Amino acid sequence: MSAPSVCRQLKSVHLLTAFGWLLIAVVGCSSDQPVAAPAAQTAASGEGVMANPLPPGSSSTGQAQSGSASAWKFTERTATSGIVFAYRNGEEAGNFSILESLGGGVAVLDLDADGVDDVCAAGGGSFDGRRILPLPTGLFRGIRDWKFRDVSEVAGISTTAFYSHGIARTDFDLDGFSDVLVTGYGGLQLYRNCGDGTFELQSDSCGLDDRQWSSSAAWGDLNSDSERLIDGRKRINQMPLGAAALAGTTYPIEREFTAQLLGFEGICQNSLDAVSDRDFAIEFASSASLLMMHLSRMSEEIILWMSAQFGFVVVPDRFCTGSSIMPQKKNPDVPELIRGKSGRANGNLISLLTLMKGQPLAYNKDNQEDKEPLFDSADTLRDTLRIFADMVPHIQVKADTMRAAALQGFATATDLADYLVKKGLPFRDAHEAVAHAVKACSNKGCDLSDLSLTDLRAACDLGEKSNLIGEDAFQVLTLEGSVNSRNHIGGTAPEQVKKAIAAYRKNLG
């Protein structure tokens, strides 16, 4: 939901098991001593959450000494770390369901921006057959030297309303402090990091109201393409379990209740269709190819804009390569690769459609060929979005060059025609008058806005209707006037552009 987080560097991931987790520290094979903590700013060991935080965005994380992969090993540090936490589920109560096969999630974050990683873990819960019994989330502040302190209650993040599974972190409000998303059976909880060691629950206020069961957490972007995927999920997310190989099962099952437990929108109503169609794969591949097509078109614009003929933008060197024979040339590798990958996604869609078009009903061995195009589309789309989101915020725009280009080709000629129509002249006559004016300017080598009022009237050749053109005509003949005149939703006026940006930012959280 990009959050802008896809552009951010991911921190290290720690493993959480079903009944507890181990905090692991990397140490050198030549020594059993842990890698030394950075010398800069050792945190105080007070009881509060915050202790001598660095300014937001700063980091004092130390670097391990270089060495080969074989020079590392792991040492178990749970007992001395100060982390006393266990992920709980219904197994201990003798109640088993699909939930008991899932481990919990963990997020590594720097909650107080002190340069030391902290740990947040899903609490889990138990299930007695009909009721979900939640257990609190754990938050442990790192205080260096492989020591942690439980600050869950102090921070106000421990209370949970459901059986939690997943944890994700990002700085969704760009204030320099990591925020936390908790997922699970029954809903989502989004906690805003206030920066003072406490968190505020923001799920309701930001519109994050999802009551479906989920076991993992991630951040993404909301736009028309993502909405298409979300809408498709409602049709795709139908449980086939119980359809068996063809005609259902003779075992006493409750498909609706099972679908509810597993987080499906509903159940497949026709067993024959459930085991034979691949509509779910085709619909996803279709949405993926459409999204890739949009990314390809945007990439094509970037490729043209950074060419010598346009020179509108500069793409950072890390997304480009130099030419093998022209030292002055910079090739837009990432946009070109994205443009090429769109053909890959289109091919996967055609492959799936071709696979299914000649099949009779029921399962056929042909369907073993459905995995490769589906998974390839998913991987291609994920990787493309990640690198595209990393590239776009770092593109530099040459505003002066773009303005000079916009002034070429009599870009405001249509504005003059619209001006004459508003004065009462039929559009056909206005169109002809502007054509005469453009021809006159072409012969003089000037723009429409460069003409005097007398010359403009003469150039339009309107005869007795020349007085329709007044001094106010020049307000629409300037580039700024042309842009400002389109002041409506979706228009180019700066006021409307600012409103659109604000609306997208609101949707992003």
Image (spheres, rainbow, N blue to C red):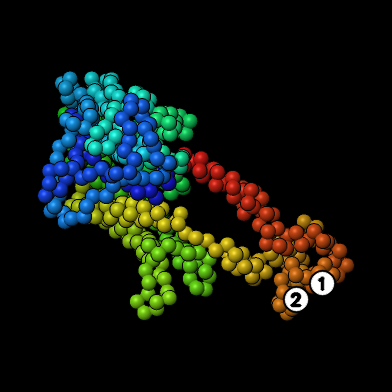
In the picture, residue 98 is in which quadrant?
A: top left
Residues at circles 1 and 2 in contact by the CB criterion of under 8 Å: yes
Instruction: Return the x and y of residue 473 as percentages of the image width and height.
Output: 78, 61
Q: Residue at x 17, y 35 (%)?
A: 77
Q: What kind of residue is marked 1?
A: Asp
- In the image, residue 161 lies at what x, y percent? 35, 24
Residue closer to the observer: 402 or 236: 402
* Residue 238 shows up from this direction: no
Q: Which mark is residue 73?
A: none
Amino acid carrying mark 2 in the image: Ala
Q: Is the residue 56 above or below the residue 70 in the image?
A: above
Q: Is residue 137 left or right of residue 448?
A: left
Q: Is residue 412 visible?
A: yes
- Residue 166 located left or right of residue 494: left
Residue toward you, 174 or 491: 174
Above or below for 210 versus 452: above
Q: Quadrant of residue 212?
A: top left
Q: Which residue is mark 1?
A: 455
Which residue is nearer to you in this view: 30 or 24? 30
The crowd level at tag 2 (other Cα within 10 Å; few <14, some 14-19, many 20+) is many
User: In the drawing, does residue 192 fall left or right of residue 477?
Assistant: left
Residue 21, position in %: x, y?
A: 19, 33
Residue drawn where x is 29% and y is 27% of the image: 150
Count neighbours of disc 1 (C-alpha within 10 A) and say few if under 14, some if 14 to 19, many if 20 or more.
some
Q: Which residue is mark 2?
A: 440
Residue 23 location (% of width, % of height): 20, 36
Q: Residue at x 23, y 50 (%)?
A: 64
Q: Secondary structure at mark 1?
A: helix
Tell me how far mark 1 sits from mark 2, CA to CA.
9 Å
